[in-house]
Amino acid sequence: MADRSIESQLLWGFHQVEMNQWRWTARDFAVALRPPTHAEEAGARLLVRLFFPPSHIAELGAITLEAEVEGCPTGPERYAEAGMHTYVRDLGAGAMATNILPVAFTLDKALPPSPTEPRELGSVVTLIELNSK
């Protein structure tokens, strides 16, 4: 997520790179991904690595992430503990018949902007990619 060459793939809901490694997202965020080779036949695996700091979970409680691909929800995942997490979903071959696949993400809650932090803070994302199955 720190590679500035991928910024055109970040459609909305991403904040600037921090510590040359990661980005905060807003509650809603989206990317455009290129399906891997042969995904039209085999489908693909969506992989997201995200982090919730302890203060985030302490203030908001458990947080649920869900993705939507081609208008179809991929299924929610609930994160009740702080730390690094991985969201993995297998996507069918039908959604892969494209050069660019938009994937929209929604968190059920985020920290709102405040006087000390003007951004809405959803999660820290370190990686989003589509892999071959």
Image (cartoon, rainbow, N blue to C red):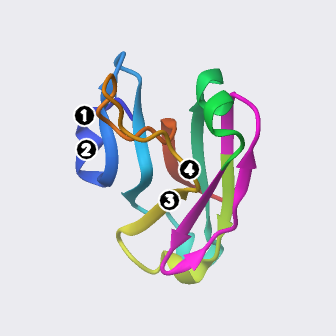
Does the image show residue 36? no
Q: Which residue is mark 1?
A: 4
The earlier-in-sequence mark between 3 and 2 is: 2
The earlier-in-sequence mark between 2 and 4 is: 2
Q: Are marks 2 and 1 in contact (CB under 8 Å)?
A: yes
Q: Which residue is mark 4?
A: 109
Residue plotted at (35% across, 68% down): 100
Callout 3: SS: strand
The stretch in magenta equals 64-86
Q: Residue furthest top?
A: 19
Structural crowding at the residue carrying mark 2, measured as other residues with C-alpha within 10 Å and reported as few (<14), some (14–19) or many (≥20): few
Instruction: Classify the position of the N terminus by image quarter.
Output: top left
Q: Amino acid at mark 3?
A: Phe
- Residue 83 sits inside the magenta stretch: yes
Does the image show residue 122? yes
- Name above or below for residue 39 compared with residue 65: below
Q: Which residue is mark 2?
A: 7
Label 2 to label 1: alpha-carbon separation: 5 Å
Q: Are marks 3 and 2 in contact (CB under 8 Å)?
A: no
